[in-house]
Amino acid sequence: MRSMSQKRSIVPAMLLDAGLVVASLILMSAVASGPRTSSPVTAGAGAGVTHLRVTNQVILPGVTRLGINLGEQTYYDSGQMVKNLLYRNPGFEGMAYRSILHCMSSGPSICTDTRSSFTWPAEFWDGASFEVLDGAAAGRKGSVKSSGPSGGGYGLTLNGAGSAIGQGDWLAVSKEFPGDPTSGWWPNVQGGAKFDAERKDLSPETAGHQALRIEAASPGQSAELKSYFDSMEGFTFVRLRGRYRLSFRAKGLAGTRTLHAHVKRIVNGNADYLEQDFPLTPAWANYHAEFTANEAIGPTGPVEAGFTVEGSSVLLDDVVLEQVDGDSTNLTAFRDEVLQTLRALQPGVLRLMSSNAQLGSTVDNLLAPPMGRQRPGYSVWQTTMEDIPVGIPEFLELCQEIGAEPWIVAPTAMSADEARHLAEYLSGSPATAGGTLRASSGRRDPWTRAFRTIHIELGNETWNGIFQGESMDDPAAYGRRADSIFKSFRAAAGADSSQFDLVVGSQAVNAWRSGEVLKAAPAANSLAIAPYLMHSVTHWANDDELYGPLLAQPEQMSRDGIVQETQAAANGRQLAVYEVNLHSTEGSAPQSALDRLTPSAAAGVAVTGHMLRMMRDHGVRDEMLFSLPQFRFKRSDGALVRLWGSVVEMGADGRSRPQLLAEIAANHAIRGNLIKVEISGENPTHDQPEGNDGVRLNGVHELDAYGFQDGKVHGLIVLNYGLHQSRKINIEAPGLNANSNAKLWHIVSPSPGANNEDQVHVTVREERLSNSDLELTPCSMVAITWTE
């Protein structure tokens, strides 16, 4: 999740080569400006016009379009991504927990993790299985004899033979918790009615392991089960427009054998969409009912869907509420609005990481059908998990649909057997166990036939104590574990092994850790970091204080900061960016200043410029914005900062934040090879005084440009990081002329602080490019494409 730069050479003006033509580019819009606190702008030779010469010199071959994290599936904000609007626990499945402990106090068969804040009760892990991941007893397996709070932390007494547990060993422990079928729902009973898990009498069509038994057949008994979505107070992210179907499996057991279902929006005395009794047969059967909704912009309130049983006993399973008259070409598991947003973005790579419902999962659970998925937990601060994860199969289908390379975060505790199974699922023939599973779900061809590269990252931020229970904060231990798992994975991948990019993650601000991880993991192809911008905001009096450090920080990080340091630590290994955005979770800035900063046009220009700079100056091919959904994040001081999502509301009629809009514009131009663009004439710089997040840099460049070429097709991105002056640009490039087929996309914004939170103020405008005189306005960017 969220952490924290580059050499630029200035090339003198050069004579035009034969066959190259010059086009002038000027983009106009009104931009508010305030008093300048940094030093005056200085101009180079040829004051008044900046000359860009697009060469054919390749800087980085085979680039990838900018990517994004798919983010968390939720039931309350822009994270409502899957078609089934009742996705939390639709199959009434049980829970499975898998966590990693650090044996800081040990004995031959004792592991005690003395880190603080464990909330697991005594006996929580009794009967669980374990495997030592790293250390003196690495490879030892067995079961847990007893467990409970110990030594200020949590301790396990272990069964099974093998090497003695050593101090510093890392151990993974796994246990299934069947039952609790109403987890993720809101149950209510009267008169002695009850809910229970049914694990024997299951529908022959279900993929799950348990159903919900509802006992309410006696007089005076009733049971009600509710689920909610779109439930963030004061906001609406899912508008019901069209025809919807509620479907489920059920069986009547006793009494009247009747199940009542309802769907309603709780607003202005409720908007009732469905109220229906279902007489049930004494055998399992499938049921459904449809309704039509046409919600417009207006009052907000949650949608409630539920079931009521009175005078009956029934079994219920596999509940789905989804639109049935949407885009007929959308064959994915994701809502039309999500697919529309991703198609517009054209991400080069899409990352699957859910810190809520994925990191404690097994590979088998992530490959299972949704109705057969358990609720996986891992955190030392929790004892329950109410949600099932988005799975690997539907994620791969989404990646194929939008043309993105998949980036899969595998659980840190993944075993060697799980690694082999995942490799077979992705690349094996139907004769392998993993290939058989893939073929049984309808896909015979390996997924390696669909993608140039599949990225597998072991764990998410294993250095980060926020994820304790999934993390391994010893870099050497994590590196050794990754090396072992990657070797098992690559061996099982066989002939397609070269199509996998095996990734270790590290902390962007700790280059030493990165080096230690890589030394221990020679089997890793790539090192991934998250170089976030603007952690701490303490100055906000005017635009220069609020946006100046933000726009200068990418160059600082690349020139002599954390990105430069991490590249050196990588020692030739490929550098990747698994997450990037603003990270304004610290500092004294009030809510009003945060609202001016994190969802601003300036943020969009800065983040996309940061990603492009890392591509050019550090050879980073794979970079992912964090993230697609999430409306806001509650800081420790109670402020609600508009992070981490890049959309307010999905879809063609939704509102995107400038971070997404700038990436959309850039991805139009990114293709083929990254090529050098020479800058001459006016090349303005200024000195950035120390400000937010400690940013201080002399000679900050206000203009930058990036060229791309794929055969006869060209792309160019130009950014103006200055806050006060428009800049005239002349472009010299092969095949670009007044009669070309050039297209232009530019960010249109009335000010650096403009946003789309309540209404649209920042847009991407597409038009044809002519050689008329135009200007690149302050704090803006433009992307151009043309064909020779």
Image (cartoon, rainbow, N blue to C red):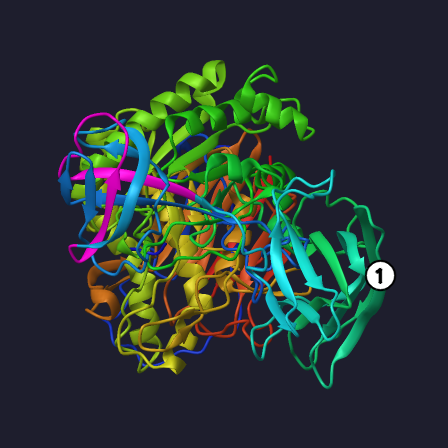
Tell me the quarter of the picture where residue 9 sits: top left
Q: Is residue 360 above or below residue 767?
A: above
Residue at screen point 75% across, 69% down: 263
Tell me the quarter of the picture where residue 765 sits: bottom right
Helix, strand or loop at mark 1: strand
Magenta stretch: residue 24 in it?
Answer: no
Does any portion of residue 580 appear in the rendered image? Answer: yes
Residue named by callout 1: 278
Neighbour tally class for label 1: few under 14, some 14-19, many 20 plus, Cα within 10 Å: some
Picture coordinates of residue 510, whole percent (x, y): 20, 48
Magenta stretch: residue 162 in it?
Answer: yes
Q: Amino acid at mark 1?
A: Phe
Q: Number of callouts in the render? A: 1
Q: Nearer the viewer, residue 766 or 99?
A: 99
Quadrant of the snapshot with the N terminus: bottom left
Picture coordinates of residue 678, whole percent (x, y): 37, 43
Residue range highlighted in magenta? 151-175
Does any portion of residue 778 appear in the rendered image? Answer: no
